[in-house]
Image (cartoon, rainbow, N blue to C red):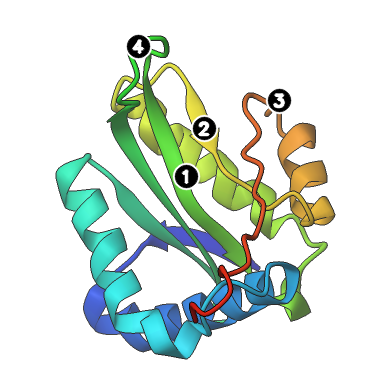
Amino acid sequence: MISIRPYDPTRDGEPLRALIVEHQDFHRGLEPSWPPGSTIIEAYVQFLEAQCAAHDGTILVAEHDATAVGFICAVTSLRNDSPDDPATFAWVHDVFVHPEHRGRGIGGALLAAAESFVRSRGARELRLGVLDRNENARALYRHKGFRDYARVMTKPLSSPPGVS
């Protein structure tokens, strides 16, 4: 049975770190410019915790048989810097389910729990980012009611001659 519960730094610190490393390394397989998860883990956990503290957020853990198998981080009060997008919105920083546990509805349960959390805080819109190559995640998000909103495109630039 799967349960979704709030992250407890004492109980979940190491399991969350292991999931984040795997999450980052999975994304690195889709986007090679991303750093290995092990090189950024402490800074990334600090980033998520700081985002939660600054923007009324939460980290939720999915647990199966007392083992953390997934997580989501959502914050409730963000705004773009641009005046042409004035909406305040909630944001999902990360959602990840360990590959051995995918296809069991855990990702959807994490999204539903995060949505419930941000709604309880007054959020009227929930946004997230997804790598374009992550087709399975994009399909899940669409199935859960998300739609394409903006697309970020990238072009690697080679160094000019003589510059490394």
Secondary structure, mark 3, is: loop
Q: Which residue is mark 2?
A: 127
Quadrant of residue 64 in the image? bottom right
Mark 4 Cα-neighbour bin, 10 Å: few <14, some 14–19, many ≥20:
few
Residue kind at label 3, given as amino acid type: Arg
- Location of residue 108 with respect to 60 vertically, above or below: above
Residue kind at label 4, given as amino acid type: Pro
Q: Residue at x 52, y 32 (%)?
A: 127
Q: Which residue is mark 4?
A: 86
Q: Residue at x 72, y 76 (%)?
A: 29
Quadrant of residue 138 in the image? top right
Secondary structure, mark 2, is: strand
Which labelled disc corresponds to residue 65? none
In primary-sequence order, the first of circles 3 and 2 is: 2
Secondary structure, mark 1, is: strand
Q: Nearer the viewer, residue 79 or 121?
A: 79
Q: Residue at x 22, y 40 (%)?
A: 56
In primary-sequence order, the first of circles 4 and 3 is: 4
Q: Which residue is mark 3?
A: 147
x and y percentages locating residue 10 in the rendered image:
23, 82
CA distance for labels 4 and 3: 19 Å
Q: Which residue is mark 1?
A: 92
